[in-house]
Image: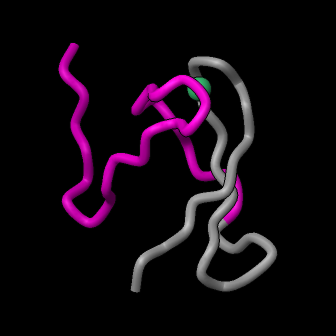
Amino acid sequence: MPLTLSPVRTVVCCPNCGSPDTEETSRFGATACKALRRCLACREPFEQVKEL
Ligand SMILES: [Zn+2]
């Protein structure tokens, strides 16, 4: 089953294991330019720094 990715979303790879299989858990982290994500492969949460 092919993965369909929304064009407005970019693939964010996990900084821990490099897996692109991540999900956004919170749109805003500690600052507005960061989003909280979680890796579905290693289940480690991490912060995505949004480049504006
Ligand atoms: Zn990972």
Q: Residue furthest top?
A: 1
Q: Quadrant of residue 3?
A: top left
8 relative to 25, above or below: below
Q: Residue 18 in the image: state x and y as whole percent.
A: 46, 28
- 39, above or below 23, in the image: above
Q: How far from the left and from the top, in percent, is residue 10? A: 31, 56
Q: Residue at x 45, y 26 (%)?
A: 19
Q: Does residue 20 sit above or below 36 in this rendering?
A: above
Q: What percent of the width, then of the height, locates residue 2?
A: 18, 21
State the image coordinates of residue 45 (x, y, percent, origin top left): 74, 40
Q: Is residue 42 above or below residue 28?
A: above
Q: Nearer the viewer, residue 5 or 12?
A: 12
> Left or right: 24 with respect to 6?
right
* Residue under the point 66% across and 85% down: 32
Where the N terminus falls, by quadrant? Answer: top left
Could you tell whether 21 is left or right of 45 in the image? left
Magenta span has 41?
Answer: no
Q: Quadrant of the C terminus?
A: bottom left
44 with respect to 40 (left or right): right
Q: Quadrant of residue 17?
A: top right
Observer-nearest of 18 and 20: 18
- In this picture the colour scheme is one colour
Residue found farthest to the right: 30
Magenta: main secondary structure equals loop
Answer with the quadrant where ligand 1 appears in the image.
top right
Q: Which residues are magenta?
A: 1-26
